[in-house]
Image (cartoon, rainbow, N blue to C red):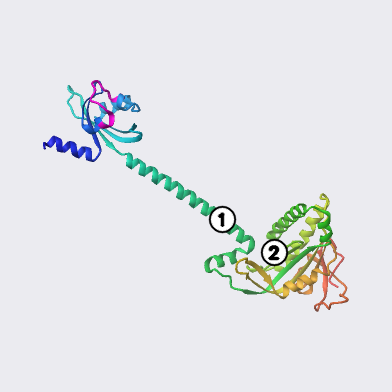
């Protein structure tokens, strides 16, 4: 076997087509067997543009004149299959004999692999984006169920250790005649109304350092001082309570449903922790919560009842009027008070 035959077999084995190109006419003079197998031949007067119609021949001529070399890619159909080759054209002759060697290497498989890699990268990127979005949604949901510090603890350790908070203030609210309101209105209307009201309460509470713990139909429960300490926690819930009523008063002027709220405030120790295993929620319970609930039951409509435990922590910006003792259940030492802003009722004082 001759050296030429061996070279031809090697070129065929690695998928390389070779041809000689007349740079003056861009005609193909010599083509090896691999080149002929791909593009046909050996017909006479076959030009480079006939074999590769997509090539920019003007750019090719300029690059060959400047540097004597041109590289590019071209695709064509071969036996029902799309094939891509890398083109390398290099000047080989003298100025009087402008000949170039055209080498075409089959890179179809490489292109297919690149396409597969690109598709896989896009899929990974899309999945990563979806996972990130789902993670953000889960985090947003959990932050609606528990304070951020409790969420960070749960994310790091898988549990939230119960904590006793010795000095916090609690706000509880419910609506009078809620059953009658339900009977008189469509459920979707009630849900929409409560969504608006509780969203407004959340914003007011956040403004004054209160953390909403939960809502339960017609009741709203918030604390100040859990899980992060708040120096003036009593004033926080008092300010929030006053503005809750102010918001409802303005709302009732322009809405068909008149919401009549009563609120109870108290201070003292509570326990905060995540309760539940599968359907878990951050909950706050303890003496201050129970006291605030009982205090709320003594409040007239659209008013705030404050237990004596919180009254001692409030400053002169709030006016306190003693409520008469309950006839059935004895009250805590010090009694209960009706709380208002001092500017609204400066004549009242602690009785």
Give left or right: position of 311 versus 97. Answer: right
Name above or below for residue 52 compared with residue 239. Answer: above
Q: Which image quarter holds the C terminus?
A: bottom right
Q: Is the magenta stretch mostly helix, strand or loop?
A: loop
**Residue stretch rendered in magenta on the structure:** 37-49
Q: Going 35% across and 35% down the picture, which residue do you hit?
A: 81
Q: Which image quarter holds the N terminus?
A: top left
How crowded pointer 1 is (Cα within 10 Å; few <14, some 14-19, many 20+) is rated as few
**What is the CA distance from the residue labelled 1 to the residue labelled 2?**
22 Å
Give left or right: position of 262 versus 107. Answer: right
How crowded pointer 2 is (Cα within 10 Å; few <14, some 14-19, many 20+) is rated as some
Pinpoint residue 101: horizontal percent, then vertical percent. Answer: 21, 30
Secondary structure beneath dot 2 equals: strand
Q: Observer-nearest residue: 220 or 149? A: 220
Q: Residue 174 magenta-drawn?
A: no
Secondary structure beneath dot 1 equals: helix
Q: Observer-nearest residue: 35 or 333? A: 35
Residue 72 picture quarter: top left
Name above or below for residue 49 compared with residue 71. Answer: above
Residue 79 picture quarter: top left
Residue 319 picture quarter: bottom right
Q: Going 45% across and 46% down the picture, which residue do you hit?
A: 122
Name above or below for residue 343 compared with residue 104. Answer: below
What residue would you read off at disc 1?
136
Q: Do the residues labelled 1 and 2 touch (CB within 8 Å)?
A: no
Pinpoint residue 175: horizontal percent, then vertical percent. Answer: 80, 61
Pinpoint residue 93: horizontal percent, then vertical percent. Answer: 18, 27
Q: Observer-nearest residue: 19 or 336? A: 19
Going from N to C along the chain, the mark reached first, 1 or 2, is 1
Q: Residue 43 magenta-drawn?
A: yes
What residue would you read off at disc 2?
214
């Amino acid at each position: 076997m001759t050296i030429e035959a061996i070279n031809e077999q090697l070129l065929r084995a690695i998928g390389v087509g070779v041809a000689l190109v007349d740079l003056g006419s861009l005609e193909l003079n010599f083509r090896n067997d691999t080149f002929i197998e791909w593009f046909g031949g050996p017909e006479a007067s076959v030009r480079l543009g006939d074999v590769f119609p997509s090539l920019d021949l003007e750019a090719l001529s300029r690059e060959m004149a400047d540097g004597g070399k041109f590289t590019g890619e071209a695709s064509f159909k071969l036996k029902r299959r799309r094939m891509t080759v890398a083109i390398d054209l290099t000047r080989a002759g003298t100025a009087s004999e402008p000949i170039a060697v055209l080498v075409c290497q089959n890179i179809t498989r490489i292109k297919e692999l690149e396409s597969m890699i690109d598709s896989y990268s896009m899929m990974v990127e899309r999945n990563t984006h979806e996972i990130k979005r789902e993670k953000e949604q889960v985090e947003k949901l959990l932050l609606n169920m528990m304070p951020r510090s409790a969420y960070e603890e749960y994310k790091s350790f898988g549990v939230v250790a119960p904590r006793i908070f010795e000095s916090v203030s609690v706000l509880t609210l419910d609506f009078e005649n809620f059953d009658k309101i339900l009977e008189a209105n469509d459920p979707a209307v009630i849900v929409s109304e409560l969504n608006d009201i509780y969203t407004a309460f959340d914003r007011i509470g956040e403004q004054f350092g209160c953390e909403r713990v939960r809502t339960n139909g017609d009741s709203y429960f918030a604390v100040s001082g859990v899980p992060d300490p708040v120096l003036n926690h009593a004033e926080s819930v008092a300010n929030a309570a006053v503005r809750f009523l102010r918001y409802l008063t303005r709302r009732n002027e322009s809405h068909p449903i008149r919401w009549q709220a009563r609120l109870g405030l108290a201070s003292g120790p509570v326990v905060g922790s995540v309760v539940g295993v599968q359907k878990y929620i951050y909950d706050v319970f303890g003496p201050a919560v129970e006291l605030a609930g009982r205090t709320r039951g003594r409040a007239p409509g659209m008013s705030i009842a404050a237990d004596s435990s919180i009254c001692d922590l409030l400053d002169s910006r709030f006016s306190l009027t003693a409520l008469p003792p309950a006839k059935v259940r004895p009250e805590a030492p010090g009694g209960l008070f009706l709380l208002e802003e001092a500017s609204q009722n400066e004549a009242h004082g602690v009785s």
